[in-house]
Amino acid sequence: MSTHTQSPSGTDQSVAELLAELGIEAENSGAFDGSWIDTKGELLTAVNPSTGEPIASVRQASAADYDRVASASQEAFAVWRTWTAPSRGEVVRQLAEELRKYKEPLGRLVSLECGKVLSEGLGEVQEMIDMADLAVGMSRQLFGLTMHSERPQHRMYEQWHPLGPIGIITAFNFPVAVWAWNATVAAVAGDSMIWKPSEITPLTAIATTRIAQRVLERNDAPPIFNLIIGDRIEVGESMTKDRRLPLISATGSVAMGRRVGEVVASRLGRSLLELGGNNGLLVMDDADLDLALAGVLFGAVGTAGQRCTTTRRLFLHKNIAEEFKARLVKAYGSVRIGDALDPNTLMGPLVTAKAVDVMMDAIEAAKAQGGKVLYGGKRIDRPGNFVEPTLIEVPEQLPITCDETFAPILYILEFDDLDEVIALHNSVPQGLSSAIFTLNMRHAERFLAATGSDCGIANVNIGTSGAEIGGAFGGEKDTGGGREAGSDAWKLYMRRQTNTLNWGTELPLAQGVEFNL
């Protein structure tokens, strides 16, 4: 069975120093608009999922608090959009330097609050740093196009302008990195923003906001990095309905995304949605099995199965299925489960006790539908929200395998025809990440072709999880269709303007239209 490690938890010294240095106390304000607002909503307590112990509390914001933050963000935008893009990039460059300074304690706070293992907590802060560095480069390349006009002595081109204050809604599993995907790009684009973090992980949001505000103050910049912590109805609905926010970027469940999309569309705003994933991985009989095993293990077990890119369905070619399943069961038995802050831990806890219940219900449903548990499937009897990573062999794609359960459950199916398995792979509602392990060029290209994987991300000989920030991140179908981070994702945070300039003495009309008195 998996190794269950025991180690001291609670707020270790470096985290305690971080909380103190950034002014995070036993009880904290849940709203920031350039200064911390005296919020008076219900008390929200952040809990360490490794122990079930409280860390600190936040006094949530009200709809009135939200309105104050939105007004401040609107005023900040009016100033920030007048800064040159390279000067905005310089502020973001300094943000990266400040995050480097706080990488270790902030990474520890991430692990403490959301339960991801220490290397992933540190990696998440590094992702913020990398994203800021990338955005600095973008600040010099917010380019438009020049087109040839059909009219003589006319020049036609396009340019991009700041969009406005934007709303950023993030999930618990990447409590700060997804904010950086949006915030750093939005900042160089000339936008201000309001961040609504998950109610499960408010402390990392407060710490990050304090770090960012220090940078703004040093540069006499307006308060563009604002924060609101509150419930879905009073604060979340206020944000999505607010016409002052031309873009809402939301990461979370499909149900949440549908609601956000409907409300924002009703006011003709823009939505950038990063929703559910039900990611499949194919292993061909010509694959490097050592490589495939490593890719499957991290993809399925990393972050305790609580990534949107987690590997949830494993398709094994019949020629290698028995060998690979045996190796996978052995590898699962070596996974070290324990406190997220223990550097030896490979899998930490699920984020809440409710998440454990959801996982157990999914396992029972899979068994009732014909699935067979090959490994795991149980709660771990110790303080905290610990479970065993679980392998379930299924005879075919079952109703439960078409759902996304945010937990370390991996469903295993066998196949013998590539075209048939690609069709099976694509038959679920979600379309985020996918992968194939093969040494055959034709198999790889077939998977990447227009008739191959229907996901926003398709990989060859790497797993479904762990995307780099240089590419645009996002997926299709129920995943929402959004794209964040690299490539040309910056265009979502700006408005395009087409310009035509007549430098001649005549006024010819397009399409040969004549209008002469």
Image (tube, rainbow, N blue to C red):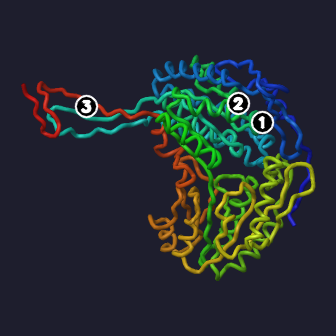
Q: Residue at x 64, y 70 (%)?
A: 397
Q: Position of residue 435 (x, y in %)?
A: 58, 64
Question: In the depicted view, which residue is nearer to us: 441 or 272?
Answer: 272
Front: mark 3 or 1: 3
Q: Which residue is mark 1?
A: 105
The residues tagged by marks 3 and 1 sit, at their Cα atoms, a distance apart of 52 Å
Residue 324 image position (x, y, % from top left): 71, 75
Q: Image height check: is 476 above or below 460?
A: above
Element class at badge 2: loop
Cα separation between marks 2 and 3: 44 Å
Spatial CA distance of label 1 from label 2 is: 22 Å
Is residue 336 among the parts visible in the rendering?
yes
Mark 2 or mark 3: name the one nearer the start of the chain. Answer: 2
> Residue 510 location, x and y as percent?
17, 37
94 displayed left or right of 445: right
Q: Which residue is mark 3?
A: 500
